[in-house]
């Protein structure tokens, strides 16, 4: 069987990872792969623009931005004659199964080509441009799509390829602007992409503590006055900077476009504060893909290729979509129609319909943003006294959770308090009210600015002492942010009659009742960035294997996920274990690949994968068996995985989870864990979550990421099996500074 792969439309970080995943999966399943250069323009041009792909063609492209296959606008493809040429050239290469990575326009074009394919075949046979022998078995076109779009504007999927990377660019810019804005007491207008979809602007506003956001889906009457009031209220409370985020497709209630210059002028007119404009433009599209865009794009590519190869003749085109860690295929045109309906609703000023069509997360973030910028004083009198405390190791995103907790609690008329150094500090009456400025700029800070502690009430006297401290301070509800200790502490607090909510926060992502915990996405990015640098260090020396130890202890999430995101040859986790038989197989396969031309290898190991074979022992074993074929270097990443500014996904998740937790302790009873399930926030009773936990190994009995572990194992097995020297085509050469390893 032969399949074709092409990228089309605007480029997006992660496209290369999707191409690589598709090509490697197709090879593993016994297919030939042809790639199409320059998108549909390559199909129309034919010739060398459509050519066989070999293993090495997709080596070392995962960490590169853009698309190595190229993409271009193609006016000819919009005409029937142009599409007929595309059919002719595809069939000449033996192609009638295409995996297309692009936006809704590119995917719509794929469906048009599919529907016209039989008539074009008939016409080409009639004109003599093709002969029956060429068209046999290619009477119909089969299509599978994956969405490459930084705007996250496709209906039916959690996240599109490139969106998370674009969020990283935007949030980095916001964090940078904040420091200079604060220095000069200045206001900034930040314009971001999103012609028909305001997701980037909305999520960035949450991440960067923006004062106001303007979206295509949610215009407001008198937006100038409301924006000015929000900025003025913040200034009255002591803020030295203001930030407004503008989606490029933002409009007013009459559907008229709102420009950055209009926003700047309105700020100065309403507040007498100087404002400047920053337009990030195509910076948002470029650069290295984030960890998420490497991992899920790879999985989308692998599953897309497998689905394409299994499709029966006449099958409707499919779109590979994400829901949490799962990949789900859906009817392509159903998703395209859903996306176009949102744009239509905006054009027809049916803004409530547009918001609803964007999905659960979008509507929730919109309401949350309005609450977070509320001018209500956090140090209110009356209402309930509600506490937030961190337990366990610090995790990026904890501070963003405190900000959301404080603002949501105060907005509901209650008093938010924070325990310094967790519940252990509470024993010594170390708590304080949260004021408005306390929570203003902490979302971008790493670690936990109010401290954390591993202590939780284990003994009866601990429970008595904590109960007395909570009673002394009239605490009527508690939100705990952290790892396994939070679950156990919540169960104890429930016995005191207090409503309790747990916000999972641990880079290991080892808690039950949630797809992911705060901090894990930041850690994944730290690992991918570190491995990129390690590989670059091997440019001069070459012939090197890195054994990299990552955190996670007995939970293999970080190792499995970053094994996909870094292209590791071998991943060792506690769940799978390590024994001599496996080591013998892995070492033999890797040493053989170096004999065949490999220059850099990567082995990832979780820090408690095995008592006998730790990272140091594995490094020595690989070095001992290399016999001069390669050198081995050990790298323990350690606590750099816990540090640094939180990634955008961790900030957004922290705000959503903490807001729901705050509402629970203010209005409900019992102890629950708030977790992420796809784009939804779900509540699970703490006792039920504990029942689902493997307490000995501190991980879920059935990890929600188990499918990713399987993906990682399948992909690394393919890498070892297929790692052979190949000659790259000049058009797919990676830059000369890129390491030449065969990953």
Image: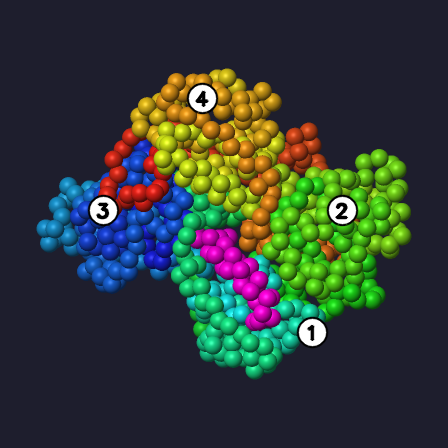
Return the residue at label 2: 422
**What's drawn in magenta, residue-wise?**
158-187
Q: Is residue 687 above or below residue 649?
A: above
Marks 3 and 1 sit apart, C-alpha to C-alpha, by 62 Å
Front residue of this view, candidates 263 and 516 = 263
Residue located at (58% from left, 51% from top)? 645
* Mark 2 surroundings: few (<14), some (14-19) or many (≥20) residues within 10 A: many
Dot 3 or dot 1, earlier in sequence = 3
Marks 4 and 2 sit apart, C-alpha to C-alpha, by 44 Å
Q: Residue furthest left?
A: 128
x and y percentages locating residue 112 in the rendered image? 30, 58
The label shown at residue 50 is 3
Return the residue at label 1: 236
Dot 4 or dot 3, earlier in sequence = 3
**Magenta segment main secondary structure:** helix
**Is the residue under label 1 in contact with that under label 2 (CB below 8 Å)?**
no
x and y percentages locating residue 37 in the rendered image? 26, 49
Please tell me whether mark 3 or mark 1 is closer to you in this view: 1
Decide whether residue 512 is among the magenta residues.
no
């Amino acid at each position: 069987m032969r399949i074709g792969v092409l990228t089309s439309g605007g480029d997006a970080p992660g496209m290369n990872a999707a191409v690589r995943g598709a090509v490697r999966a197709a090879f593993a399943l016994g297919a030939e792969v042809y790639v199409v250069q320059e998108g549909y323009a390559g199909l129309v041009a034919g010739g060398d623009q459509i050519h066989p792909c070999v293993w090495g063609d997709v080596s070392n492209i995962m960490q590169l931005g853009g698309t190595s296959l190229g993409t271009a606008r193609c006016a000819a493809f919009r005409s029937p004659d142009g599409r007929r040429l595309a059919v002719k050239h595809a069939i000449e290469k033996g192609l009638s199964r295409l995996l297309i990575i692009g936006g809704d326009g590119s995917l719509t074009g794929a469906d048009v080509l599919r529907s016209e394919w039989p008539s074009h075949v008939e016409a080409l046979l009639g004109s003599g441009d093709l002969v029956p022998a060429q068209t046999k078995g290619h009477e119909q076109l089969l299509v599978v799509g994956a969405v490459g779009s930084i705007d996250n504007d496709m209906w039916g999927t959690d996240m599109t390829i490139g969106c998370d990377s674009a969020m990283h660019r935007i949030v980095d810019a916001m964090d940078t602007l904040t420091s200079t804005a604060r220095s000069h007491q200045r206001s900034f207008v930040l314009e971001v992409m999103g012609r028909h979809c305001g997701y980037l602007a909305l999520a960035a506003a949450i991440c960067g503590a923006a004062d106001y956001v303007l979206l295509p889906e949610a215009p407001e009457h008198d937006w100038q006055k409301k924006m000015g009031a929000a900025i003025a209220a913040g200034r009255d409370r002591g803020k030295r900077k203001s930030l407004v985020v503008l989606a490029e497709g933002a409009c007013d209630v009459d559907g008229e476009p709102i420009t950055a210059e209009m926003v700047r002028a309105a700020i100065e007119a309403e507040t007498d504060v100087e404002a400047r404009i920053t337009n990030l433009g195509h910076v948002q599209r470029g650069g290295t893909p984030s960890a998420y865009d490497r991992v899920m794009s790879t999985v989308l590519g692998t599953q897309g290729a497998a689905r394409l190869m299994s499709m029966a003749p006449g099958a409707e085109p499919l779109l590979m979509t994400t829901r949490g860690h799962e990949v789900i295929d859906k009817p392509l045109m159903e998703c395209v129609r859903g996306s176009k309906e949102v744009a239509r609703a905006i054009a027809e000023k049916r803004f409530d319909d547009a918001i609803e069509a964007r999905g659960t997360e979008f509507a929730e973030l919109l309401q949350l943003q309005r609450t977070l910028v509320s001018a209500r004083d956090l140090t209110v009198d009356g209402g309930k006294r509600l506490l937030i405390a961190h337990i366990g190791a610090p995790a990026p995103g904890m501070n963003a959770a405190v900000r959301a907790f404080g603002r949501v609690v105060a907005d509901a008329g209650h008093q938010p308090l924070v325990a310094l150094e967790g519940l252990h500090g509470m024993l010594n009456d170390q708590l304080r009210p949260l004021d408005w400025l306390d929570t203003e700029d902490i979302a971008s800070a790493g670690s936990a600015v109010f401290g954390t502690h591993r202590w939780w009430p284990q003994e009866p006297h601990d429970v008595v002492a904590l109960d007395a401290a909570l009673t002394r301070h009239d605490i009527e509800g508690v939100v705990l942010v952290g790892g396994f200790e939070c679950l156990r502490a919540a169960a104890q607090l429930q016995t005191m009659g207090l409503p309790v909510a747990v916000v999972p926060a641990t880079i290991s992502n080892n808690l039950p009742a949630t797809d992911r915990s705060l901090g894990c996405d930041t850690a994944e990015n730290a690992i991918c960035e570190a491995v990129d640098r390690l590989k670059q260090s091997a440019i001069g020396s070459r012939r090197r294997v890195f054994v990299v130890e990552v955190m996670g202890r007995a939970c293999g999430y970080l190792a499995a996920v970053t094994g996909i995101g870094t292209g590791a040859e071998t991943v060792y986790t506690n769940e799978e274990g390590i024994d001599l038989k496996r080591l013998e197989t892995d070492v033999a396969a890797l040493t053989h690949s170096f004999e065949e031309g490999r220059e850099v290898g990567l082995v990832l190991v979780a820090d408690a994968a095995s008592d006998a074979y730790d990272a140091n022992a594995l490094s020595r074993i690989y070095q001992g068996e290399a016999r001069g074929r390669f050198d081995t270097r050990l790298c323990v990443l350690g606590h750099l995985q816990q540090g640094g500014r939180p990634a955008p996904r961790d900030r957004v998740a922290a705000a959503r989870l903490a807001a729901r937790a705050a509402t629970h302790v203010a209005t409900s009873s019992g102890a629950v864990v708030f977790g992420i399930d796809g784009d939804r926030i779900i509540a699970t009773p703490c006792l039920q979550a504990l029942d689902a936990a493997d307490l000995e190994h501190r991980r879920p009995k059935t990890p929600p990421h188990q499918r990713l572990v399987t993906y990682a194992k399948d992909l690394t097995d393919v890498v070892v099996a297929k790692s052979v020297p190949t000659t790259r085509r000049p058009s797919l050469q990676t830059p000369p500074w890129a390491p030449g390893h065969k990953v």
